[in-house]
Image (cartoon, helix red, strand yellow):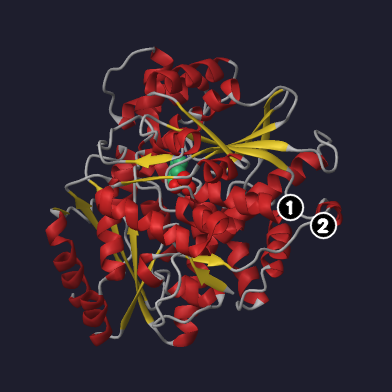
Amino acid sequence: MFIETRGNDEKNPKKVPFSYAVLNPSASFGGLYAPESLPKLDEEFFAQMAQKNYKELALEILKLFHTDIDESVLKEALSLYDAFDDKNSPAPLVKVGADLFVNELYHGPTRAFKDMALVPFGYILSHLAKIRGEKYLILAATSGDTGPATLHTFENRENIKVVCLYPDGGTSDVQRLQMVTAEGKNLKVIGIHGNFDDAQNALKTLLASNSFKESLKKQNINLSAANSVNFGRIIFQIIYHISSYIELLKKGEIAAGEKIYIIVPSGNFGNALGAYYAKKMGLPVEKILIASNINNILTDLLTSGVYDISQRTLLQSTSPAMDILISSNVERVLFDKFGSERCKELMSELSANRSYKLEKEELEALREDFDAVYSDDDFALDAIAKFAKEGYVLDPHTATCIKAYEEIKPKNIPCVICSTAEWTKFAPTMWNALQGDRKKYADKEALKNFSEKLSLKIPSSISSLFEKEVLHSAVVDKSQIEKNITDFLKG
Ligand SMILES: *Cc1c(COP(=O)(O)O)cnc(C)c1O
């Protein structure tokens, strides 16, 4: 069962099953749903799982959660991993150094790690809508990768409409094209004048707005969200962390029970939260290292206990999917560690004062599981160039992890970096890194140059984007979002 991070307002149910949390992700007082308890994994579990492939492992883990989704539906959802590059291994683990491994999470249809969760999640949500005969509007705010993955997973699904909000100018060209050329009749893409936090705020406001929900109710439409505020995504993000550990065991890189480090390039903290839950479930993880770019709010939090955005503005970086100041899933960790009352207090402070400060003991409690470091664009581009020279390609987000690897990870503990995107989504930055320049290249040109230089293939899903018709050209002010959505639902 799932409970609420900010406590219960006596209007919502006190505990809800998985399906409820997926369909109604917004909990009392603007909080989120979190699992009441987590299943436990022991050494026997890891030994047994050594024989299984990714889908089989995923099913076993999902079953341990005792969700109210039929096993046959879970299997159908997981079977969609067959469309990834390698159907037996949707998230391959690659060795790139003596104690360094990369968990490549980007081999799905939209070439970013968001597919790992959104592909099965979209199937399950659509299935629930269909069997209940209910219509859903799914809102997604994106910093560039959630949008394409959400549009893809819900394309032409019955009873589902999707509205995707992206910050105009805040994404790469490829990411924007992935969205504005989306073809499903049930899809709407809106650019907004603002940054990702503005898009996510607009989404949260709509999710919490009774008048908006009432107007949807009149049309028999329910409201849900595809961002990682939805626990239905997080559950799939626990699995690949466990899978990477089992791969290390299988390959004889670690002994049973040996601890590892996991490094996560973080924005909204969904990926890192998945690692945290996996650790709590018993995955032998020494620490989870949070890598950020110059929007280093998470580094501040995890090193000083202060979350203060009152004096900050969002900065644009070469890792746009991490250009975030309000990192939603931190809330679930605060709840897990300190309970709903304290969590609600901290979240209220954040919205009232745009800052909060943890007690010393609270910071220590966080640092038992996490440490953090950030890097700027120069560091990331140098890391890309250095690794490319040695034959391994890191995208600009994953490159921020190298700082954590070099600066915080102690020697002799194996380390898994989560790679969150394929280089093809950020080709101009990649080409800048190789050239050692900061010129502005067009995506198409940079894709060609980079792929030729390193003899890499560009997936047709990316190269074909440039020929596709733009079907969603709207870019609006924040105040116009609700009206645009209403018009789309009418039409
Ligand atoms: C979404 C995303 C991130 C950030 O992940 P969170 O789960 O939001 O912390 C990092 N890198 C890429 C490429 C992404 O798409």
User: Which residue lies at the image location 34% right of the left edge and 42% below the top edge?
Assistant: 325
Tags 1 and 2 touching, CB below 8 Å: yes
Under mark 1, the amino acid is: Gly
- Classify 10 Å Cα crowding around label 2: few (below 14), some (14-19), many (20 and above): few
Mark 2: secondary structure: helix
Under mark 2, the amino acid is: Phe
Q: Nearer the viewer, mark 1 or mark 2?
A: 1
**Picture quadrant of residue 295:** top left
Of residues 291 and 63, the one drawn nearer to the viewer in this rendering: 291
Q: Please say whether residue 181 is visible from this viewpoint.
A: no
Question: Where the N terminus falls, by quadrant?
Answer: bottom right
Q: Residue under circle 1?
A: 282
Specify whether 118 is left or right of 281: left
How many numbered circles does the render carry?
Answer: 2
Residue reaching furthest to the top: 436
Of residues 255 and 75, the one drawn nearer to the viewer in this rendering: 255
Specify whether 251 is left or right of 114: right
Q: Is residue 413 above or below residue 21?
A: above
Label 1 to label 2, Cα distance in Å? Answer: 10 Å
Specify whether 353 is left or right of 415: left
Q: Earlier in the sequence, mark 1 or mark 2?
A: 2
Q: Is residue 231 above or below residue 142?
A: below
Specify whether 384 is left or right of 35: left
Residue 472 location, x and y as percent?
Answer: 22, 55
Residue 244 location, x and y as percent?
Answer: 69, 44
**Picture quadrant of residue 471:** bottom left
User: Which residue lies at the image location 27% right of the left edge and 56% below the top edge?
Assistant: 201
Of residues 278 and 117, the one drawn nearer to the viewer in this rendering: 278
Q: Residue under circle 2?
A: 45
